[in-house]
């Protein structure tokens, strides 16, 4: 592979990682700030079950609910360590939080086998329980003492403190670990030539989970991307063992997190922990492979699901700068653009605060600022001081409610999706007739994404697709895949033929779901 | 916490080890162009349309004793295997056609019923498979449906 291909490919993959991580990174900084300034050290300690047996199950449950990725979880883990939480619980939370969130579980439940997703959830619970217990048993003295932190007063001062803390979280050592994690993705882009993992997850390949373990430890995968890939692996009859390995090690672990563990707990415990983790995950993966293998699914001879971990350019590619710009531009989604700007703004504010106020005097001034004394005339506007239990309860139910609302926003009504798909299909007709490859490369993945979202949306709104409609959609998606390959090969005749077949299949699918 | 310089110096070495492990995961060679083009998206005996599947199934039930696989098929695909696969693919092929929902439902349920029966009992040869009354019934019925569909399509095509 040419050195310029390696470098440009690596830069593209790192750029895509930063783009994808924006929303979950924001959540990570916010959660870390809430832990620090609202819950405080004691509250955070109690939230994770203190020193009781509930530590690990609670870490798992909170991890399942919080929409953070393996980058966004790093500042949260740092706060947990400062709160005197045991190493086993911190690692359990760090491992489980990026695996699932309510939106991704919903996607997995409808597009994979629900039993498989349930088993995967239970598998992740087993992994974090065993690993957490093992850690605390092997390294009982690894818990850091609670770092003192003055209590944050309630009201506007607390809101200000959370905002300032969020900026400080962004411009802190945690960002260095995030940079290291992104560098890990770049390393993969250098080491893996384009398309070299297309046959890495075959159902009959006994080494597929091992290969996946080697790759995914360095890779960065958002919870959503992990579940999309798992659903795709199920649909294409790939190795189930490799899917579970990809989920736990790919979504849960990255290079930055490993470096953080080494810096905080030293080399030996980290090596023992990661070795045990890989062995346990591989053991469970091989155990669940055969029972969960979907029946009646033809095994595809290759998959493009893992192309995102490899260099995006073939060895002899030219025009790398333009292609890189195009790929990055096409990777942008509206929510990621907003989140990206918000991240940059918060990071800049954090840098500004660190530069002008290195001794943290602003935060101290904010939390020691005297509260406004109510006068008798203000009695109706009197600020009610809520007990921490109420705040915690409202936060928890708010999180659940926000997750439900987020599910409905992320998966719009079927009618809207159908209109959107219709418009994209019209775009594609023009594109394949003219041989506009770049246009097709842009629209096909979007159409595939909408197709999957439609299934979830129908399920979410209590009108799941029947088998007739499901198979009609499956046929359409197969035609899209064939068109995608024709586009890769730049074969105009094939593209026209598969495009035409796709258009017919889409019409049939639309008729099948006309009553939804 | 690792704070000492000596420990910090070990970090690059650790990264090198990791990279070496990764490079060990690479395939022996890149995916060649030829290999990429030969990606088969369908099994060799995939019939592409419900009509072709129906024709081939009718052929197999008409003369099971002398059934031979088409010459293009690999030797491991026996007529018996071909028959089982074709019956299993009927629902997806029906979905890739203009057959209506009621017809699809009948094909789908017959296919599922036969597949689950064959999974448990595993018949040894093609004559046993084709002598299954349910299999004969659905294949004959499907042949009629396909004939009607073809006639309808021809009429539609020839109409001014």
Image (cartoon, coloured by chain):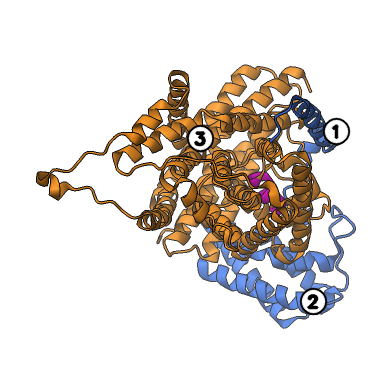
Magenta span includes A245: yes
Characterize the magenta stretch by its predominant secondary structure.
helix
| Distance in Å between CA atoms under marks 3 and 2 | 58 Å
Q: What stretch is highlighted in magenta?
A: A244-252
Q: Where is residue B118 in the image (x, y as percent from the top left)?
A: 76, 76
Asked if badges 3 and 2 are on one and the same chain, I answer: no
Report helix, strand or loop for mark 1: loop
Image mark 2: chain: B
* Depicted A131 relative to depicted B38: above or below: below
The residue nearer to you, when weighing A146 against B159, is A146
Q: Mark 3 points at which residue?
A: A22
Image mark 1: chain: B
The residue nearer to you, when weighing B72 against B81, is B81
Mark before the other along the chain sequence, 2 or 1: 1
Magenta span includes A346: no
Choose top left, top right, bottom left or bottom right for residue A116: bottom right
Q: Residues within 10 Å of mark 3 (few under 14, many from 20)?
A: many
Q: Residues within 10 Å of mark 1 (few under 14, many from 20)?
A: few
Q: Where is residue A35 in the image (x, y as percent from the top left)?
A: 47, 45
- Which residue occupies 34% across, 35% down? A368
* Mark 3 or 2: the one toward you: 3
Q: Where is residue A19 in the image (x, y as percent from the top left)?
A: 54, 32
Q: Name the residue under label 1.
A: B29
């Amino acid at each position: 592979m040419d050195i310029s291909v390696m470098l440009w490919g690596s830069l593209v993959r790192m750029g895509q990682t930063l783009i994808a991580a924006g929303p979950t990174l924001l959540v990570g900084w916010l959660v870390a700030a809430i832990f620090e300034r609202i819950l405080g050290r004691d509250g955070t300690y109690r939230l994770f079950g203190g020193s009781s047996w509930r530590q690990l199950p609670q870490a798992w449950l909170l991890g399942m609910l919080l929409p953070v990725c393996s980058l966004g979880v790093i500042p949260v883990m740092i706060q947990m360590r400062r709160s005197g939480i045991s190493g086993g619980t911190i690692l359990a939370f760090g491992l489980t939080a990026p695996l699932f969130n309510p939106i991704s579980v919903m996607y997995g439940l409808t597009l994979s086998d629900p039993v498989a997703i349930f088993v995967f959830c239970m598998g992740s619970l087993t992994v974090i329980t065993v690993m957490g217990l093992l850690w605390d048993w092997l390294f009982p003295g690894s818990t850091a003492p609670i770092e003192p932190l003055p209590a944050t007063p309630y009201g506007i001062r607390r809101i200000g403190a959370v905002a300032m803390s969020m900026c400080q979280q962004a411009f802190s050592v945690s960002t260095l670990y995030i940079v290291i994690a992104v560098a890990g993705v770049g390393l993969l882009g250098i080491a893996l030539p384009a398309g070299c993992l297309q046959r890495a997850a075959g159902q009959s390949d006994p080494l597929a989970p091992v290969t996946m373990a080697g790759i995914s430890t360095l890779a960065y995968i958002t919870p959503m991307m992990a579940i999309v890939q798992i659903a795709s692996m199920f649909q294409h009859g790939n190795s189930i063992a490799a899917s579970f390995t990809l989920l736990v090690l790919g979504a849960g672990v990255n290079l930055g997190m490993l470096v953080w563990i080494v810096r905080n707990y030293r080399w030996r415990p980290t090596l023992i922990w990661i070795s045990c983790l890989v062995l346990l995950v591989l053991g469970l993966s091989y155990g669940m492979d055969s029972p969960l293998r979907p029946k009646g699914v033809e095994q595809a001879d290759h998959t493009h699901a893992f192309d995102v971990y490899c260099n995006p350019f073939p060895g002899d590619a030219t025009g790398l700068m333009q292609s890189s710009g195009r790929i990055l531009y096409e990777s942008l989604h509206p929510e990621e653009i907003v989140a990206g700007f918000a991240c940059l703004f918060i990071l800049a504010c954090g840098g500004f605060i660190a530069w002008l106020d290195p001794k943290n005097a602003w935060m101290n001034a904010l939390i020691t600022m005297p509260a406004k004394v109510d006068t008798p005339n203000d009695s109706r506007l009197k600020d009610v001081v809520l007990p921490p239990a109420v705040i915690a309860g409202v936060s928890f139910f708010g999180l659940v409610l926000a997750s439900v609302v987020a599910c409905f926003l992320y998966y719009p009504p079927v009618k809207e999706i159908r209109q959107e798909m219709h418009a994209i299909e019209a775009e594609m007709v023009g594109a394949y007739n003219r041989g506009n490859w770049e246009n097709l490369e842009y629209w096909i993945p979007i159409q595939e994404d909408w197709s999957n979202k439609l299934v979830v949306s129908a399920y979410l709104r209590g009108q799941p697709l029947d088998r007739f409609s499901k198979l009609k959609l499956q046929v359409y998606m197969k035609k899209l895949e064939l068109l995608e390959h024709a586009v890769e090969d730049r074969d105009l005749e094939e593209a026209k033929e598969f495009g035409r077949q796709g258009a017919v299949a889409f019409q049939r699918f639309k008729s099948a779901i006309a009553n939804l | 916490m690792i704070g000492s310089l000596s420990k910090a110096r070990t970090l690059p070495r650790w990264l090198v080890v990791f990279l070496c492990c990764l490079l060990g995961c690479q395939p022996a060679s890149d995916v060649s162009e030829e290999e990429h083009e030969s990606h088969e998206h369908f099994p060799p005996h995939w019939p592409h349309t419900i009509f072709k599947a129906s024709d081939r199934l009718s052929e197999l039930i008409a003369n099971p004793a002398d059934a031979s696989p088409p010459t293009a098929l690999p030797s491991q695909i026996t007529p018996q295997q071909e028959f089982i696969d074709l019956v299993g693919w009927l629902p997806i092929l029906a979905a890739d056609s203009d057959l209506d929902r009621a017809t699809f439902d009948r094909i789908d349920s017959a296919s599922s019923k036969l597949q689950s029966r064959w999974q448990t009992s595993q018949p040894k040869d093609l004559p046993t498979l084709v002598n299954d009354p349910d299999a004969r019934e659905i294949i004959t019925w499907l042949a009629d449906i396909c004939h009607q569909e073809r006639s309808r399509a021809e009429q539609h095509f020839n109409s001014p």
